[in-house]
Amino acid sequence: MALDIQTFSNTAGGSALFKALGHPLAVAPAHDLIARLAAAGPIAVYDPAGQLATFAALYDLSGLDISGVFVQDVEEIGDRRLGQATRPLTELSGAPVETLFVAAFDAGRLVDPLRSLLPTGCTVISLDEMRLPEAMLSEPKRYLAPLNFATNFVFFRDDDAEGGRHTRLVTANYWGGYGAEAPRLWATLFDADGVRLATWEDPLPPANGSVVVDSREIRERFDLPAFTGQLFVHMVGIRGHDVVKYALDTYGARDAVLSCTHDANAFPSDLYAGLPAPDRGERVVLWVQNSHPTPIPAGGVGLREMGAAADTTVTLDRDVPGFATVAADVSALLPDIAWPRQLEVVAGKHFVRPRYEITTAEGRARIAHVNVERVDLAPDPELPKLGDLMGKGHILPAPILPPDRYETWALPTPMATGQRHLPLAAIAFDASGAEVARRRLGVIPRADSVAVSIDEMLAGAGARLASGYGHVELIYDFDPAAEGGLEADGWLHAIFRYRDRESGHGAETSFGSHMFNSPLTYRNEPQSYAGRPPGLTTRLFLRTGPSPEGPADRAWDTLCHLVYPASTPWHPHSATTLSLRDREGTEIASTLVEIPCGGSYLFRVSEVFDWADRRAAGPAAYVLVRDVTCRLFGYHGLARGDGTFCLDHMFGF
């Protein structure tokens, strides 16, 4: 069964409660609190804000002797909580208890006005006993303020297999840009069993400076054994933004392990989708990483083929301790399905968006992530009617890397439980924005998996990319004559897979659609990060590999593919600044590029910035992609001369 916790609402946003209760620093005080309540004898419980259920979901309260559960809202009287029917708060004064447990933080302001209702001599105990230290709070006056719990999890590995496999988190102090004066990174590292290996705190660099956490350096700093687990990060003393975004590279002594992905999406979900079944000779591992202190029971998570009935779910037949990491072998759990089939992950809110790792028969590895499968969406009957106003409407853009060197595949993925059909088309463009090929994919039933070879699509149209590269867009292609031909909810997703024809190395990424660069708006689209549209702008973070003076064992170059999608005609060209920054966020060099509307721009950092500038920027450099005229969508990666590369979509701040 799923955990009874609230994590994210599309109306209210993310919840801080489960983060506060499940924070690694709150676990020991929580057990102390429960032990104190157990020793107090019969207790009354007051649940003024509905927080009791989350506390009970994350900790075992079965040892408590509870005489009654009391509520303030008359509409909640009679609800079942902790196995009891709730009672009105007015009955508390006559309850034969000496201890009242207030299941809330900041309990003083909730209880003090009600002191006259408490039994004489009653002791009050609350969740405030498991508060984090004041120094950990960005907003001390309101404990459950989202800024107090800007946390996230990171797949983190440093082992000696194959000569060494490592992970490298890279982000920026974008909180400084919102006025944070002395933000800090607080981190704790868990091994595969959920045992804490190390805890530390480091100051962040000046505003917009880069942040790098490398597993090799952490292992050396704390003299740690090899590990595969997860890093919990908490940004402290921040302003403006409560989401921790990052890029994550995996690399090693062998080129074959190079890969990249990004942040974990800090809000656990009931379901995830977009997990590909293994292709011939491949092994697919889903990394199940418990995001809570409470164990995941055997059977608590599972997999099923997309579109299959719930009773076909195959579950993990072992417990997963709190904060522990387990490798779930997809082939062992579901041995009879293969690419391009895809799977749903039944997660039960036990973990944040997980990583999966694919290893080929030749030993080449790549890591990517699944995505949140929405349970709250239904098809929007208005979307098919917007063509004249919103043009293409929702667009899902992805690179077409140079076809003479790379294969490109697109695999549409149902990403909401209400999606029964996907009426889609794929359109290929060269860098100039000229359409060169179009393929109608028809109305794809939920249970079908249609992998689109972009090579075959181009060849079938007799098309070539004059620029040598381009991009593909998936859009809705409504067909009123077909069953499901008018079904769309705006939550269009796909996996994009790439393979180097010479080296055999691969990469993949997945994301969802948006409306882009339109003066008109529909609901929350197009999304704008600088006020209401048409305040459409771009601020993308492009991390780089080590500088020319970095580790000598591997020379990484950084690649970037920027796409300028437009639902309706927008500015003919972008006005995009590429700004090379050092660790402190200081600009070392910049250049202006113009991307045609509907087109794209593929470059390597070494082609745009000379060796002297890259050397001056140093090993923790990044490129800020900035445009105040339009919203771009970007993909980043690393590449080596031997054909090893990685690719994933970028994040903005």
Image: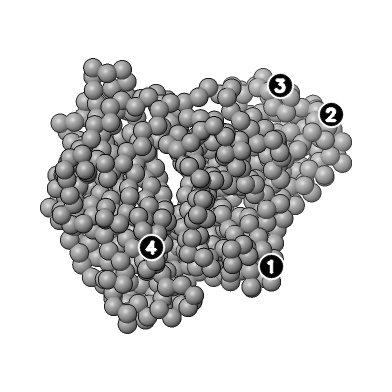
User: Which quarter of the figure is the C terminus placed in?
Assistant: bottom left
Residue position marked by numbered label 1 in the rendering: 224
User: Which quarter of the figure is the N terminus placed in?
Assistant: top right
| Precedes in sequence: disc 3 or disc 1 | 3
Depth check: 111 or 427 in front?
Answer: 427
Residue position marked by numbered label 4 in the rendering: 643
Q: Amino acid at mark 2?
A: Pro
**Alpha carbon separation for disc pair 2 and 4:** 74 Å
| Precedes in sequence: disc 4 or disc 1 | 1
Disc on res. 85: 3
* Number of the front mark, 4 or 1: 4
Q: Name which residue lies at 15% across and 54% down.
A: 466
- Residue 356 visible in the picture: no
Q: Amino acid at mark 3?
A: Ala
Element assignment for label 3: strand
Depth check: 645 or 120 in front?
Answer: 645
Residue 329: percent from left, percent from top: 60, 42
**Alpha carbon separation for disc pair 4 and 1:** 33 Å
Residue 62: percent from left, percent from top: 79, 33
Q: Residues within 10 Å of mark 3 (few under 14, many from 20)?
A: some
| Precedes in sequence: disc 2 or disc 4 | 2
Disc on res. 96: 2
Residue 492: percent from left, percent from top: 35, 36
